[in-house]
Image (cartoon, rainbow, N blue to C red):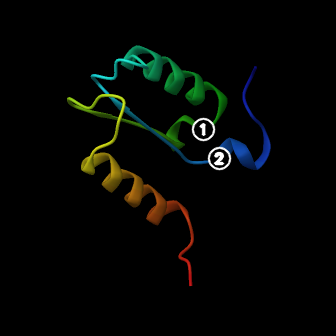
Amino acid sequence: QGPISGVNKEIAVLQCHGDCDPLVPLMFGSLTVEKLKRMINPANVSFRTYSGMMHSSCIEEMMDVKQFIDKHLPPVD
């Protein structure tokens, strides 16, 4: 499919991936982020990798997710 039009073209995306993931190799994450950049505004796509992280999560990733949420979503009262 080609680029997305309308408001969704400006959506912010954070994609996170461990460089030691045995289930989803880093190469697939890299291919996915490149596809996303062709579909939406590439300036709004962030791809973060985490050294030594497998198919799991880490504190650094969770801090990046928190920062992304704080930046892009309105505060909850």
The number of numbered discs placed on residues in the rendered structure image is 2
Question: Could you tell me which quadrant the N terminus lies in?
Answer: top right
Q: Residue furthest left?
A: 52
Q: Is residue 63 above or below residue 14?
A: below
C-alpha distance separating marks 2 and 1 = 6 Å
Crowding at mark 1 (Cα within 10 Å: few <14, some 14-19, many 20+):
some
Apparent side of residue 69 relative to residue 18 in the rendered image (left or right): right
Looking at the rendered structure, the kind of residue marked 2 is Glu
CB atoms at circles 2 and 1 under 8 Å apart? Answer: yes
Where's residue 72, x and y in %?
A: 53, 61
**What is the quadrant of the C terminus in the image?**
bottom right
Q: In the picture shown, does residue 77 fall above or below 49?
A: below
Judge from the rendering whether residue 45 lies leftward or rightward of residue 61; answer left or right: right
Is residue 77 left or right of 4 when viewed as pictured?
Answer: left
Q: Nearer the viewer, residue 36 or 69?
A: 69
Crowd rating for badge 2 (residues with CA inside 10 Å; few <14, some 14–19, many 20+)? some
Secondary structure category for the residue under label 1: loop
Front-most of 45 and 43? 45
Q: Is residue 39 left or right of residue 30?
A: right
Question: Which residue is disc 2 drawn over?
Answer: 10
Q: Position of residue 26 (x, y in %)?
A: 37, 19
Instruction: From the top left corner, tell me how far across and down residue 38 is, in percent.
Output: 61, 25
For mark 1, what is the residue?
A: 41
Front residue of 52 and 35: 52
Secondary structure under tag 2 reads helix
- Tell me the residue at 44%/21% (across/down): 30
Reply above or below: 70 against 56. Answer: below
Residue positioned 72% across, 28% down in the render: 3
Q: Which residue type does callout 1 highlight?
A: Asn
Q: Position of residue 60 (x, y in %)?
A: 26, 48
